[in-house]
Image (tube, helix red, strand yellow):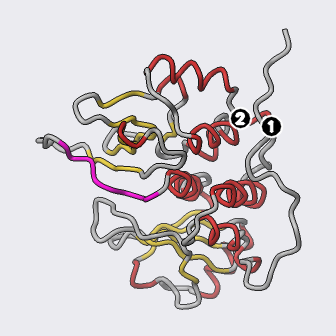
């Protein structure tokens, strides 16, 4: 039996030479990230960023074999009796079979594991590793191609609707997922620092600030092969290579 081939991968256009201020010094496709979160958001740019990030920050680039088949997503939609937004389908087609990019700490749920919070009308697509936090899409927004994402902490006394706004577009939330999961992908390349010690040389990435358990929220920075997520209580860093980490340690010894 011939296995079904997924649709062409989103964001699969040929790479061009880095544009000025494209983020080449960061080892990130800053141009794609800026387009993904801009005033006129480009969802395909989000997937271009993810493809470039996988190529430069993970053991191997993304290939067609790393995506879920359309039949799996169709079966999930039929089981739930709900449409799946285009952005969620595209993400699963792109990297749904790459847990090293999606599930090192928290997990992008497989199509068969997607479920509905029936009491609050939210489709849950991502879960924290100890089920302390959840990410979802309101059922009322599932008709949108790239809907807003809501977030909920597991609290002892939940309210009638304790889901709060998180990021305005699912594609941007999935970029954040890939970045956050990269932080925990390799213990030898990660570290912690005080947010007040984030070096001035680090450039603020254009991802919107978003809420966490520690208000006011998280911000991302990058410089010279190192990314940092500042959660306003702690900051977690990840270097792309051992050389990048050694350089960071040498330049910022003692922070």
Towards the viewer: 198 or 9: 9
Residue lying at 48% horizontally and 83% vertically, measured from the top left: 198
Towards the viewer: 250 or 93: 93
| Residue 147, horizontal then vertical, whole percent | 46, 49
- The span shown in magenta is 161-168
- Horizontal side of 132 relative to 71 (left or right) equals left
The residue indicated by pointer 1 is: 64
| Residue 248, horizontal then vertical, whole percent | 63, 80
Q: Residues within 10 Å of mark 1 (few under 14, many from 20)?
A: some
Residue lying at 13% horizontally and 43% vertically, measured from the top left: 159
The image shows residue 240, relative to residue 178, as above or below, that is below
- Horizontal side of 250 relative to 135 (left or right) equals right
| Residue 23, horizontal then vertical, whole percent | 71, 77
The image shows residue 2, relative to residue 128, as above or below, that is above
Dot 2 falls on a residue whose secondary structure is loop
The image shows residue 189, relative to residue 219, as above or below, that is above
Towards the viewer: 19 or 43: 43
Q: Quadrant of residue 227?
A: bottom right
| Residue 241, horizontal then vertical, whole percent | 72, 66
Please say whether residue 115 is one of the residues in the magenta stretch: no
Dot 1 falls on a residue whose secondary structure is helix
Mark 1–mark 2 distance (CA, rounded to whole Å) = 6 Å
Residue lying at 51% horizontally and 72% vertically, measured from the top left: 220
Please say whether residue 165 is one of the residues in the magenta stretch: yes
Looking at the image, do the residues carrying marks 1 and 2 touch, with CB atoms under 8 Å apart? yes
The residue indicated by pointer 2 is: 67
């Amino acid at each position: 039996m011939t296995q079904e081939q997924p649709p062409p991968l989103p964001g699969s256009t040929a790479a061009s030479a880095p544009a000025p201020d494209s983020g080449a010094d960061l080892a990130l496709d800053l141009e794609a990230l800026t387009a993904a979160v801009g005033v006129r958001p480009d969802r395909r740019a989000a997937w271009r960023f993810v493809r470039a990030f996988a190529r430069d920050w993970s053991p191997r680039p993304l290939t067609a074999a790393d995506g879920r088949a359309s039949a799996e997503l169709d079966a999930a939609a039929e089981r739930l009796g709900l449409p799946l937004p285009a952005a969620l389908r595209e993400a699963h087609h792109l990297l749904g079979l790459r847990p090293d990019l999606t599930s090192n700490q928290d997990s992008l749920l497989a199509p068969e594991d997607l479920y509905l919070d029936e009491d609050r009308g939210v489709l849950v697509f991502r879960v924290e590793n100890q089920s302390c936090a959840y990410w979802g899409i309101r059922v009322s927004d599932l008709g949108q191609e790239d809907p807003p994402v809501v977030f909920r902490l597991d609290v002892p006394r939940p309210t009638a609707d304790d889901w709060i706004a998180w990021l305005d577009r699912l594609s941007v939330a999935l970029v954040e997922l890939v970045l956050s999961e990269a932080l925990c992908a390799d213990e030898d390349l990660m570290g912690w620092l005080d947010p007040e010690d984030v070096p001035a040389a680090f450039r603020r990435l254009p991802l919107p600030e978003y809420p966490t358990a520690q208000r006011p929220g998280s911000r991302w920075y990058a410089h010279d092969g190192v990314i940092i997520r500042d959660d306003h209580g702690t900051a977690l860093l990840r270097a792309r290579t051992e050389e990048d980490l050694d350089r960071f340690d040498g330049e910022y010894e003692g922070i």
